[in-house]
Image (spheres, rainbow, N blue to C red):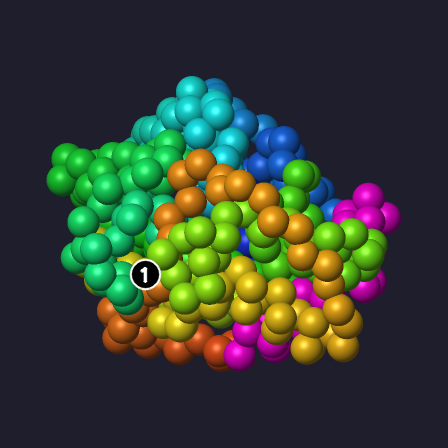
Amino acid sequence: MKIIITGGAGYIGSHCVRMCLGAGHDVAVIDNLSRGHILAVDKGARFYCGDISRADFLDWVFSREQPDAVIHFAAHSQVGESMSHPQMYFDNNVAGSLSLLSAMQRANVRKIVFSSTAAVYGEPETIPITEDCPTVPTNPYGESKLMIERMMRWFSEAYGLRFVALRYFNVAGADAGGDIGEDHRPETHLIPIVLNAAASGKPVRIFGGDYDTPDGTCVRDYIHVTDLVRAHLGALDYLTKGGDCAALNLGIGKGFSVREIISAAESALGITLVREESPRRAGDPAILIASGDHARKLLDWEPQYTDVSEIIKTAWSWHKSHPNGYDE
C-alpha cells in the first residue's frame, strides 16, 4: 500500500514510518521540520519538506505519490503551550488538517488514520475512560483535536471519507534498535524529563502535588510507542477491509502517578533522583486512564509493553546512546 505520513519526522511519526516500511508498505513523509528531525526519517521513505497548510504543495505531493491512504500526525501537541497560544494551535492543527482533508478530497484519497488524543475528554467523569464518555476538552490542544475529529465525520458524511481516530494517552519508550527516540524541544513529557534529570543530575520538577489522586500528583496511562504504531497499522488494515469510521482509545488500562514514574525510573536505572515541587500546569486533568477494549476487539490489537519499567528502559537506551538527541 502507498501511504503518506504527515509529521513523519516527529517522535511517533518516525516510529510509524519505520514500522510501515517493515510491513512492506511504500511510504512518503511530509514534515515541515518545525518540530521534527530529518535524521529520524528512515531512508527507505521519500521525504517532502513542506507545510500541510499549503494547498499547492499538497496537490503536488498527492499528484506525484497517488497514495492509497494517509496517516496524519502533523500537529502541535503541548498542553501548556496551547493554553498560552491557542491561536497557534487552531491555526496549525485545525486549519492545517482542513487543508490536508481538502487535498485528499481533490486527490480522491478516502482513507485516513488520525493521531488524536485523550485530551478530548477533559476531566473524565468515569475511570477508565471509554469512547462514549463526554468529550469536554479543558485545553486548546484537546479542543483542536476534537474539532479535527468532527471535521472528518462531516467529510465522511459528504464525501465518503473513511477514518479511524486514535485517542492516545501518554506515549513513551523508543524503538528496540535504539537509533530513533523522543527528542522534543523543549521537552514536556514526563519520562524523557525524568531521564534527562537522571543523565544531568538535575532535579525532576513535579507540577502539582495537590490533585485529587492517591499521592497528589497526576495519574496517566502510559503506552509504548511501538505498541501505539502497531495500532495505526491495524487501523489501516481495518479500513482497507471495509471497516466503519471509528474513534478508539489506545492505552493499557493502568495508571501511574508522576511520583510512581519517578520511583519506577529510579528502580529500573538503579539511581536516586532529586524532586522539586512546582505549581500545577494549566489545563492538566488529574487522571487519564484508558479502556482500550474497543481497539483490542476492532483492530485485533494487544499492547506488548504493560510494565512501565520496561517502557522506561527502552527510552533510557535511546537517551544513553543519544545524550544530545538528534543533534549528534
Tell me what residue is drawn at x 66 percent, y 39 percent.
Answer: 186
Left or right of residue 272: residue 238: left
Identity of the residue drawn at 62% across and 71% down: 263
Residue 312 painted magenta: yes
Locate residue 19 relative to residue 3 in the image: left or right. Answer: right
Give the dominant element type of the magenta stretch: helix, strand or loop. helix
> To which residue does mark 1 refer?
249
Q: Which residues are magenta?
A: 307-328
Give the side of residue 297 with respect to residue 326, left or right. left
Q: Please, is residue 228 above or below residue 50 in the view? A: below
- Residue 109 sits in which quadrant? top left
| Vertical relation: 175 (above or below) 276 | below
Residue 239 in sight: no
Judging depth in this view, the residue of 23 and 303 nearest the camera is 303
Identify which residue is drawn at 37% across, 36% down.
139
| Horizontal and vertical percent position of residue 306 | 48, 78
